[in-house]
Image (spheres, helix red, strand yellow):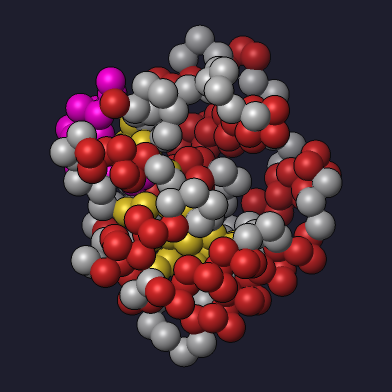
Amino acid sequence: MEFHTWEPVYEDILDDFGYPRDGDERARDRFGDLLGDDSTYDPTSLGLDGATVAIAGAGPSLEAEADRAADADVVFAASTAADRLQTEGVAVDCMVTDLDKNADTGRELTAVGTPVVAHAHGDNILELETHIPTYDTEFVVPTTQAAPAPPAHNYGGFTDGDRAAFLADHFGAGSLVFPGWDFEDPSVTAEKHRKLRWAERLLRWLEQRRGERFDVLDGRRDDIEPVDTD
């Protein structure tokens, strides 16, 4: 995903939620300041080319579907899905997070050489300042949803889960599976529900770009509003 392709969608997300673009840019720049000249992780080292990648969400169904993650070649875990999969005995190859829930897990993973894709946005500068200095930055992939500026990358996506899917796509995954995704999770807040609607729209866009059908969208496609890429 190149930023010029992502940008119209990003602008629609900003408009929908009322997020200020300059907030994302400040977070991106602060992330860069915190990293300084430290080396960061190159996701090509994940070896995704042609692989089946599990994009594990943190929905209520995750434990029941943990075997789908275990059967994949590579496991990406969105936020707290990392802890829950490890509890189920499933190794996590990469965690994708904006540091809002289980940042200590990210620290522990980088300490043992497991990469963490850490995301900067306008609402999490304090979390970046608190946690990133405790991470082994050689295993951090810094990302932004604004225009990329070294060292921060933008591979596309909005929520932790769909950003993990866009990351896998960018680095050549052969197929994607989606354990632990529950678009109708009744326990989430109204804002989180809106974010899940966006995640659904973005996954629909991604599967169209890939020429792949994600089973997580089965029975839902006809009701998904397409993203506007113009």
Residue 213 in the image: state x and y as whole percent. Answer: 43, 24
Q: Does the magenta stretch include residue 118?
A: no
| 25 on left or right of 127 | right
User: Range of the magenta residues?
Assistant: 64-77
- Residue drawn at x 52%, y 77% is 151
Tell me where residue 46 sits by quadrant.
bottom left
| 92 on left or right of 43 | left
Residue lying furthest top: 219
- Residue drawn at x 39%, y 59% is 104
How many numbered discs? 0
Residue 191 vertical position relative to residue 224 in the rendered view, above or below: below
Residue lying furthest bottom: 37
**Image quarter in which the C terminus is found:** top right
Residue 229 in the image: state x and y as whole percent. Answer: 71, 42
- Residue drawn at x 68%, y 57% is 123
Residue 44 vertical position relative to residue 175 in the rendered view, above or below: below
Tell me where residue 154 sits by quadrant.
bottom right
Residue 166 in the image: state x and y as whole percent. Answer: 48, 47
| 170 on left or right of 153 | left
- Residue drawn at x 79%, y 51% is 19
Q: Which of 119 and 100 is in front in this view?
A: 100
Residue 107 vertical position relative to residue 194 in the rendered view, above or below: below
Residue 218 in the image: state x and y as whole percent. Answer: 46, 14
Residue 174 shows in this picture? no
Residue 48 shows in this picture? yes
